[in-house]
Image: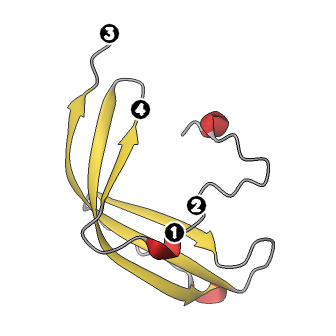
Amino acid sequence: TNWEVVKNPAYQSFNNLDKVAKGEVIRVQSDNREYIYSVASVALVSADDAWVELSGNKKLFISTCNTFGKKIDRFVVEADFVGSYPITQS
């Protein structure tokens, strides 16, 4: 993960995570590959219950607080792996 590309001084890189909808596509890039995921669910859970059960399946989980600076609730997005492809350098 390279968070250096996030140029938001408040570190709010997942603002509006609650507005992500089932079926939307999330693209994640590494140095030489792009990975594609399809959103399966978006849930608001208690911060104390924000446990994610990791299985052997290829999944992406994104979580963030619902209120900046407070530990109250969390939005958790679960996305299914669709595929990946190499990124070609120009």
**Residue 62 visible within the image:** yes
Q: Amino acid at mark 4?
A: Ser
Establish if 18 lies above or below 61: below
Residue 57's place in the image compared with 19, above or below, is above
Q: In the picture, which quadrant includes the N terminus? A: top right
Q: Please indicate whether residue 45 sits to the left or right of residue 78 in the image.
A: right
Q: Is residue 71 above or below residue 25?
A: below
Q: Residue at x 32, y 67 (%)?
A: 55
In terms of sequence position, does the residue under pointer 1 or pointer 3 come before the other? 1
Which residue bears the numbered disc 2? 14
Mark nearer the viewer, 3 or 4: 3
Q: Which residue is mark 3?
A: 90
| Mark 4 Cα shell of 10 Å, populated few (<14), some (14-19), many (≥20) | few
In primary-sequence order, the first of circles 3 and 4 is 4
What distance separates the C-alpha of mark 2 from that of mark 4? 18 Å
Helix, strand or loop at label 3? It is: loop
Cα separation between marks 3 and 4: 16 Å
Label 1, on which residue? Answer: 17
Name the amino acid type tagged 1.
Leu
Instruction: State which quadrant residue 60 falls in.
Output: bottom left
Name the quadrant containing residue 89: top left
Q: Give the residue at the far top of this rendering.
A: 90
Residue identifier under label 4: 30
- Counting residues from the start of the chain, the first of labels 2 and 4 encountered is 2
